[in-house]
Image (cartoon, grey):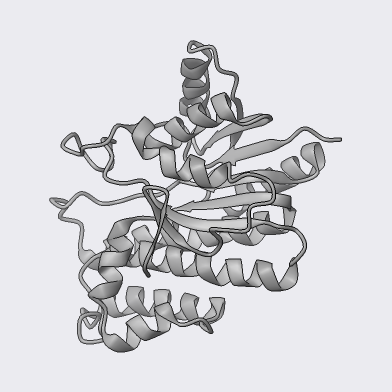
Amino acid sequence: MAAKVAVVTGGNKGIGLAIVRALCKQFQGNVYLTARDVGRGQEAVESLASEGLKPLFHQLDINDLNSITAAAAYFKDKYGGVDILVNNAGIAFKAADETPFAIQAEVTLKTNFFATRDMLTHFLPIIKAGGRVVNVSSFVGSRTLNNCSPALQQRFRSEDITEDELVGLMKQFVDKTKTDEHKAAGWPETAYGVSKTGLTTLSMILARRLSKERPNDAILLNACCPGWVRTDMAGTKAPKSPDEGAITPVYLALLPPGATEPHGKFVSEKEVQQW
């Protein structure tokens, strides 16, 4: 019987590091802190070791498909798959950043939507029966959804939107920003928000697919909002500590055996939110 294993992306700081810390304390199995930068990742592992915790490290850059496939092969070979996957890695431009919006849109969606989708494409097939998948999204995605045109809102909320259709919509947003036509096409002025609207919708699509294709495997997949957390990304004014931000992602990662819900939901403060 292979040991159980949890994998957290973007684990070297902020909410990701706090999720690794909590899993080390609460999960009966090996916990992998992954990061794109080996030096920073190993420093983070050492900082947790000084707290008496024993995370393991594996390099994983979600923007590098070779890095994703190598990591997936490693976990399949060593553990027979993955029990818990937390897709936490993400980026956001600061409000004051003067990078042109079209570039912000392309860069933000590349990581937060397309790279996270690549992770799911390669890791979902190796999620073990009884596994848990948690995509760290944001309430900004829900707020953004409400600011989209009625036609876009209808598609994002529909039960029959496909992954291909969603990918097309995300590409459309990026393309329209290049000619400054995104607002006319019904999109709001937030790349981060659109990326998280996309990630939450993708979570719902993939959860439906899991229920259909692996109905007996009892895998639960959800998106969540950690809240507004004091991190390099969100700044110092946020009300929550990283450890507080980790509470809902860790709750979803550790849903007990036999649980059937939540699944395919957007969860905040451990509560299912309307989408």
Front residue of 189/64: it is 189
Q: Would residue 69 be seen by someone viewing this image from the given angle?
A: no
Q: Residue at x 33, y 76 (%)?
A: 173
221 to 15, vertically: above or below: below
Quadrant holding the C terminus = bottom left
Q: Is residue 267 left or right of residue 103?
A: right
Quadrant of the frame with the N terminus: top right
Instruction: Specify the farthest residue to the bottom.
Output: 151
- Position of 71 relative to 153 (above/below): above
Q: Would residue 44 be found to the left or right of residue 193 on screen?
A: right
Using the rendered view, name the quadrant where residue 18 is placed: top left
The percent position of residue 274, horizontal first and vertical second, equals: 36, 68
The image position of residue 88, as x and y in percent, is 46, 46
- Vertical placement of residue 136 versus 156, above or below: above
Identify which residue is drawn at 18% across, 34% down: 236
Image check: 30 left or right of 137? Answer: right
